[in-house]
Amino acid sequence: MPAFVHWGADLGDLTPAQLSDLADAQVPAAPNAAVDSPVRPLILPLLDTAWQGRPALSGDRRLAPFELVGIEADESGAVRFTLVSGAASVGVGVGVGEVASVEVVVEFRMTVEGLLRSRSTLTNRSADPYELDELSVVLPLPSRAAEVLDFSGHWAGERRPQRTAIQHGATLRESRHGRPGHDASYLTLAGTGSFGFRSGEVWAVHLGFSGSQRSWVERQVSGLSVVGAGELLARGEVVLQQNSSYQTPWVSASYSPEGMDAASARFHRYLRRERGFSSRPHPIILNTWEAVYFDHDEAALRRLADAGARVGAERFVLDDGWMSGRTDAKRALGDWTVDTERWPNGLGPLIDYVTGLGLDFGLWVEPEMVNPDSRMAREHPEWILAEAPGTRSLLARDQLVVDLADPEAFAAVFAMLDALLSEYDIRYLKWDHNRDLLVTRSHEQTLAAYRLMDQLLARHPQIEIESCASGGARADLGILERTTRVWASDTNDPLERQSIYRYSSLLLPPELLGVHLGAPTAHTTGRTHSPAFRFATALFGWAGIEWNLSLASETELDQVARWLDAYREVRPILHAGTVVRADRRDTALWVHGVVDDEQSEAVFAVVAMSAQQDAIPDAVQLPGLDPDREYTVSVLDVGAEPRYFAAALPPWLVRGSLTLSGRALAEVGFAAPPLAPEQAVVLRVRVLA
């Protein structure tokens, strides 16, 4: 069985003899009161290899020991190891109930960005069915990895960090939501003690899958440590007949010797290369949900579109409430036809009006869900996902789940969406997923949702899809293979959004994270924030607006227009540069920014999350700049001035700018803006000519 030798810092070009010596030097001693041969972290750790931690593979029967029967490498950077259980017979003469001949191909890819990607494929070679319980990807960790950081959360409070020490035993996270969930572990970061954004070694792992899942970090008493991830399968969910296969989702892993930022940057660069460059900037979205909710009056929506065009919005998205009989959340979900009472001439007149203003048009849908009070549920109860025939899942948000693994249900949902996209000039779907599945099986449902998106995109390549799941409950690299962005949370409260953005952007670059400007008083929390704090928060991402601008004052509209002018000015940097975050003693003041690839321009935010520890706050350092170049730092007008809390401002802030070298900005910094709590200032950084 192949074993890991090293996953970490680049060791340079080694000769074959040096590689051999390196591998030999990693063979450990055999401890007392254990197996007589050394135990190493293998690419498929199992009990019969003396691995006493979580196995990578389990099923309904005992397998014969695996043997390596092939290694294949190609020019793409992929290496595949083929392992066979019962290799001597491979399905011939295997005793029923004793061993099952299966083949496992373990694949590794090292991308040009230095991102390690791995997946495994299991094929049943036996004439007997093989019921798979688990097949996961397991990667090694060095003993100096002392802490693990992952995430939890809830609706309107996603991506809340939690850090623990790595001790003997397994730290296991499981999601049984049928989607990753608001409390998804999201990204598992193991690192040396007290690792930060800019310091410490970090090993970061993400499972790119949109259904139930597990991840873990484990240290055995021997000292061997691993990190693992895989789909969480229910009993009987995957039963493989002879020569049929199961393939795990991709696990993507990033190593950094310099903190979380460098690990994060590998994910960002990989995603940008894979998705390709778009010459068209991501359009500024005006979404109708918090503006009108279910009150769909065409005249009012036209006034909203007018206000959006006045401030500089570029896309108008009609949210929930346009379907026949959909006057609240309790009815009509699943009946994807336009309400003829509120829209007697269909959506065409509104779309024509919106596009006439220079905006394109998007539409909210939730194709995977259905209300009991709907034509679909009444006429086709057999299309509703249930734990067993004749049963029905629990209601959640007055919704049930459409069984997309049912071919007839899949075809019906596809036909309704296809008809909408064929009839109307729709360029964007806000694709929602507002409840957990609440059944044990999510494998086929998740793959069917992927197929539905893939087939719609193939038929209508002009559309973009946003992944929304009652906010950020489905934010993963699996869904992002077919979607354009993630709606990170249903809250537009900027205080909550600062934290959600800070940690969501560890995996996803800013242009994939929807960040909207909400009303002065947040609908989810009831907190009221200043324009400056709201504008600074909504600048860093794919910006949009979720506020009834038709009720805003002329002063407010002018402020929003200036904010969007600033956003368009820095959007090329935000959506292509390197995200950086400063480690600070006083965590009440956050500093984050984006630096362009040439290190010639940058945009930073200095954010007072709460009252600071000291009357004179710590100096602000700006990381990520070229240490040997000179930069001018100035305050960017984002539409409104923040509120300061001091008798006198620092001289540089009075002047409005300062000039320092990149080394001085990173190491020494400058006097912090004395911001009042829940205030922010945005800085524009340019290299001197």
Image (cartoon, rainbow, N blue to C red):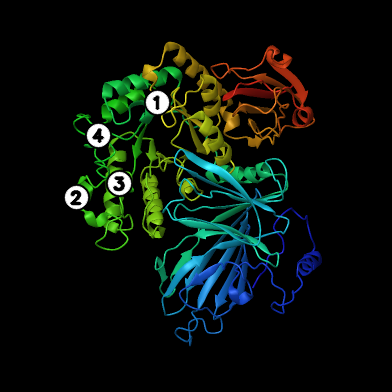
| As drawn, 85 above or below 658 | below
Q: Residues within 10 Å of mark 1 (few under 14, many from 20)?
A: many
- Quadrant in which residue 212 is drawn: bottom left
Who comes first in sequence, dot 1 or dot 4?
4
Looking at this view, is 460 or 315 the one in front?
315
Residue at the location (26% across, 55% down)?
A: 383
Q: Are marks 4 and 3 in contact (CB under 8 Å)?
A: no
**Element type at marker 2?**
helix
Structural distance between the alpha carbons of marks 1 and 4: 26 Å
Label 4 sits on what residue type?
Thr
Who comes first in sequence, dot 4 or dot 2?
4
Evaluate whether residue 541 shows in this view: no
**Element type at marker 4?**
loop
Who comes first in sequence, dot 1 or dot 3?
1
Structural distance between the alpha carbons of marks 2 and 3: 13 Å
- Quadrant in which residue 596 is drawn: top right
Q: Residues within 10 Å of mark 4 (few under 14, many from 20)?
A: some
Structural distance between the alpha carbons of marks 4 and 3: 15 Å
Residue on which the image places disc 4? 327
Residue on which the image places disc 3? 399
Who comes first in sequence, dot 4 or dot 3?
4
Looking at this view, is 361 or 326 the one in front?
326
Residue on which the image places disc 2? 378
